[in-house]
Image: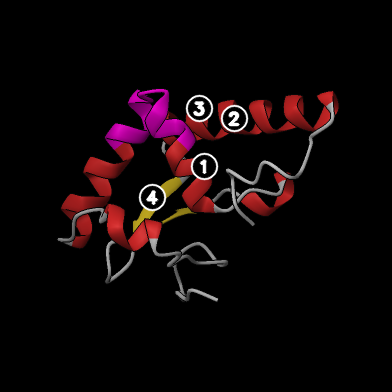
Amino acid sequence: MSCSNMTVRLTAEQTTKRATALTRLETMLAAGTATVVIGATGAIAFKGWQSSDVGMVDACVYRRLLASNSPGLRRAIARAEAVSGRKVNPQAIASGTHSHDGGKTWGSH
């Protein structure tokens, strides 16, 4: 599921649902109720929030929040990097490494 898939046209309702979900995640990151998890390769996942509810993978959500210069995302990443001792790796994210379970397991199917 790619966030840049231009062949799929979203309805106005789907677009609104995604925007609302992104805003909710940003609020959850700022409040600390959702956290960023960084995998061994530097890939990213969000724990405490289900991206599948809106049909977006964590990498897509990350890219969208990063593009909007989200302060909640920046703080959550800084916190996750300090705790895990690893940096977010854009190459790992671009290669498709992801997690479906909040960072417990990783893959790139």
Query: Chief secondary structure of the magenta span?
Result: helix
Amino acid marked by disc 4: Val
Q: Which mark is residue 24?
A: 2
Disc 1 designates what residue?
Answer: 61
Disc 4 designates what residue?
Answer: 36
Residue occupying the point 50% across, 27% down? 27
The one nearer the camera, 90 or 72, is 90
Mark 2 and mark 3: Cα distance apart in space: 5 Å
Query: Which residues, given as a range, are shown in magenta?
Result: 64-75
Mark 2 and mark 1: Cα distance apart in space: 12 Å
Q: In the visual, does 65 lie left or right of 80?
A: right
Image x and y of residue 90, in percent:
29, 52
Q: In the visual, does 24 lie left or right of 73?
A: right
**Please, what secondary structure does the residue beneath circle 1 have?**
helix
Alpha-carbon neighbours of circle 2 within 10 Å: few (<14), some, or many (≥20)? some
Amino acid marked by disc 3: Thr
Q: For residue 95, what is the image quadrant?
A: bottom left
Mark 3 and mark 1: Cα distance apart in space: 14 Å
**Please, what secondary structure does the residue beneath circle 2 have?**
helix
Sequence-wise first label, 2 or 1: 2
Alpha-carbon neighbours of circle 3 within 10 Å: few (<14), some, or many (≥20)? some
The one nearer the camera, 19 or 9, is 9
**The C terminus lies in which quarter of the figure?**
bottom right
